[in-house]
Image (cartoon, rainbow, N blue to C red):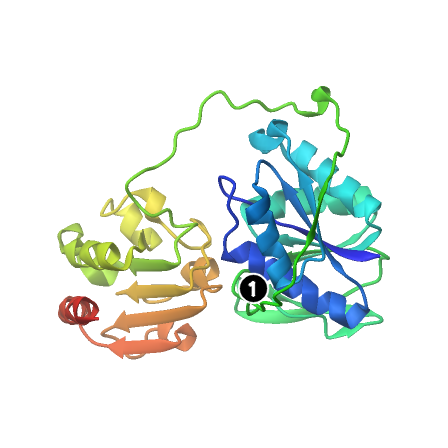
């Protein structure tokens, strides 16, 4: 019996999120007297796979097959389910990303498992199995009891600290034995954005709202983003007004992000916006209204005119 973790990779590299997942799984395995098996699908070098052992994985199942580069949900879910059955996994863990949310329900059905999405804590009890998740766009939490023999979880980013064990993992080649007919999706062309930090990948995000007063006032945020190698974002009213492109819109109806550090300049903090950024590890709010709802969620706050605060922050960053 083991805990199976599906570790996504980006162009053959793991990010902090994958290591966070393995650390979380290792903590569960310790309580259950089990071990962690990480599943890597795609072309990932052995030296990169070895990193998973440092965070608690005892074994890494390596599916090195270029057919999975199409990210076909059907094929991926069948591969994960096959690995879970081979390892007799009683808990299967995914990241609460677009990919994880797409394939976790499929895997749960294949394994006749209970599914809990957006988990934020270690289980509070193992018999019965009870785990906490976010509800109401991150404004509240609830405890969910899973009675099924197999549990499938999607884990919210920045909900668990990285724990390095100094261990090593056994790397084992794994073949789910799927026929070519399973891979119904083919990728004809891939166009990637260059020259800017993608919001979904950014460790730091600089975001502006209607308090910025107009598109002509964005130069300071752009300079700050360049200095911090951060992603640029905005609230929905800003993109609706055409001040910034819709690709920068974060919130419940835009991109869901979870950076380590999120700056909110002139953003009031509507629940729809917070629903997309509440998983940020640290939120810093800058707003001239001391009663703005954003301050209820922020870890740090500055009450002041953003146009006066931004130059001072830029000066401080440059000094650092």
Residue 12 position, x and y percent, is 52, 41
Q: Is residue 184 above or below residue 201?
A: above
Residue 279 position, x and y percent, is 49, 63
Relative horizontal placement of residue 93, taking residue 248 as reference (left or right):
right
Relative horizontal placement of residue 90, taking residue 137 as reference (left or right):
right
Q: Quadrant of residue 96?
A: bottom right
Q: Quadrant of the C terminus?
A: bottom left
Res. 76 in view: yes
Viewer-proximal residue, 289 or 122?
Answer: 122
Q: Quadrant of residue 148?
A: bottom right
Which residue is at 45% across, 55% downward?
A: 257
Res. 118 in view: no
Residue 99 position, x and y percent, is 58, 44
Q: Quadrant of the N terminus?
A: bottom right
Residue 40 position, x and y percent, is 64, 44
Viewer-proximal residue, 140 or 221?
Answer: 221
Which residue carries the number 1 mark?
A: 136
Label 1 Cα neighbours within 10 Å, binned few <14 / some 14-19 / many ≥20 = few
Q: Is residue 68 above or below residue 234?
A: above
Relative horizontal placement of residue 220, taking residue 248 as reference (left or right):
left
Q: How many marks?
A: 1
Q: Is residue 204 above or below residue 288?
A: above
Which residue is at 81% across, 49% downward?
A: 87
Which residue is at 61% across, 48% downward?
A: 101
Which residue is at 57% across, 29% downward?
A: 70
Secondary structure type for disc 1: loop
Relative horizontal placement of residue 259, taking residue 76 as reference (left or right):
left
């Amino acid at each position: 019996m083991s805990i199976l973790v599906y570790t996504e990779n980006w162009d053959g590299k793991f990010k902090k999120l994958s290591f966070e997942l393995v650390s979380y799984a290792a903590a569960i395995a310790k309580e259950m007297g089990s071990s962690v098996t990480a599943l890597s699908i795609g072309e990932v070098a052995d030296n990169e796979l070895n990193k998973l052992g440092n965070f608690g994985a005892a074994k890494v199942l390596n599916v090195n097959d270029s057919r999975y580069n199409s990210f076909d949900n059907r094929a991926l879910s069948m591969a994960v389910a096959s690995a879970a059955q081979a390892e007799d996994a009683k808990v299967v863990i995914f990241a609460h990303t677009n990919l994880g949310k797409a394939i976790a329900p499929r895997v749960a059905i294949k394994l006749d498992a209970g599914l809990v999405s957006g988990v934020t804590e270690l289980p509070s009890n193992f018999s019965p199995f009870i785990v906490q998740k976010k509800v109401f766009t991150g404004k509240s939490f609830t405890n969910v009891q899973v009675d099924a023999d197999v549990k499938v979880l999607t884990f919210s980013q920045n909900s668990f600290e990285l724990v390095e064990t100094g261990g090593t993992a056994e790397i084992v080649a794994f073949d789910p034995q799927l026929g070519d007919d399973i891979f119904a999706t083919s990728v004809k062309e891939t166009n990637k954005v260059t020259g800017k930090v993608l919001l979904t990948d950014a460790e730091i995000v600089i975001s502006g709202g209607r308090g910025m007063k107009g598109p002509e006032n964005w130069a300071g945020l752009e300079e700050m983003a360049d200095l911090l190698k951060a992603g640029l974002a905005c609230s929905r009213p800003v993109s609706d007004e055409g001040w910034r492109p819709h690709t920068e819109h974060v919130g419940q109806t835009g991109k869901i992000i979870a950076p380590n550090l999120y700056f909110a300049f002139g953003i009031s903090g509507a629940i729809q916006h917070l629903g997309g950024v509440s998983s940020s590890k640290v939120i810093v709010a800058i707003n001239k209204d001391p009663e703005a709802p954003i301050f209820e969620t922020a870890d740090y706050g500055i009450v002041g005119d953003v146009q006066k605060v931004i130059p001072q922050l830029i000066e401080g960053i440059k000094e650092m």
